[in-house]
Image (cartoon, rainbow, N blue to C red):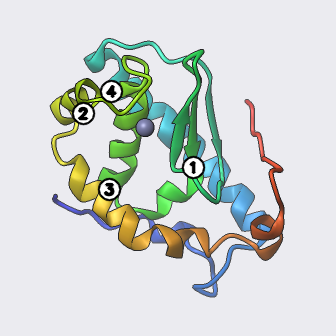
Amino acid sequence: MAVREPDHQVFPKDGKRFTEEERQALVKKARPIFLERVAYYAPLMKVSPGRITVRTQKTRWGSCTERGNLNFNALLLLAPPEVLDSVVVHELCHLKYMNHSKYFYFELKRFYPEYKAAQAWLKENGRRLISMLPKEVLRRKRRRFFFFR
Ligand SMILES: [Zn+2]
């Protein structure tokens, strides 16, 4: 996988944790990027997603509801762009298959052949990204941040 550098402007200033303001700025910055990537892939894949939600999450990079609404983790902005794209394509594939069957993976491989490299990157670095969230966010249980616009 050709890995471009992630956008370092959005990294926490001290190289450790985001302040709450920085976390919110990250979500704001991430939203149009996810919308753009979804708008790029959805017609290629012939799928029509519902509402797109971007927030910071501790345990998920993306998810897809039964109604076809997609959620993405803003922390993916700190990953190489290819990793962000692979998560977008993964969730869009769920609009066709709401499972991780072989058919799902055929589809994922078709539109994002290097998905395994992206998965490996997240496995190796994901925890580090999540640890950049403000302490209060990490402590908070089950409370979510919605940024509808
Ligand atoms: Zn999945």
- Which residue is painted at 66% across and 54% down in the image? 56
Q: Give the Cα distance between marks 3 and 1.
A: 15 Å
- Amino acid carrying label 2: it is Tyr
Task: Look at mark 4 in the image and give the residue it sits on.
Answer: 41
Residue 53 in the image: state x and y as whole percent.
Answer: 64, 34
Q: Secondary structure at mark 3?
A: helix
Task: Look at mark 3 in the image and give the residue it sits on.
Answer: 119
Q: Residues within 10 Å of mark 3 (few under 14, many from 20)?
A: some
Q: Secondary structure at mark 4?
A: helix
Task: Look at mark 1 in the image and give the residue it sits on.
Answer: 73
Of the residues under marks 3 and 2, which one precedes in the sequence? 2
Q: Give the Cα distance between marks 4 and 2.
A: 16 Å
- Which residue is painted at 51% across and 50% down in the image? 61
- Amino acid carrying label 3: it is Gln
Instruction: Say which of marks 1 and 4 sits in front.
Output: 1
Instruction: Say which of marks 2 and 1 sits in front.
Output: 2
User: Who is closer to the viewer here, 40 or 137?
Assistant: 137
Q: Is residue 126 above or below residue 72?
A: below
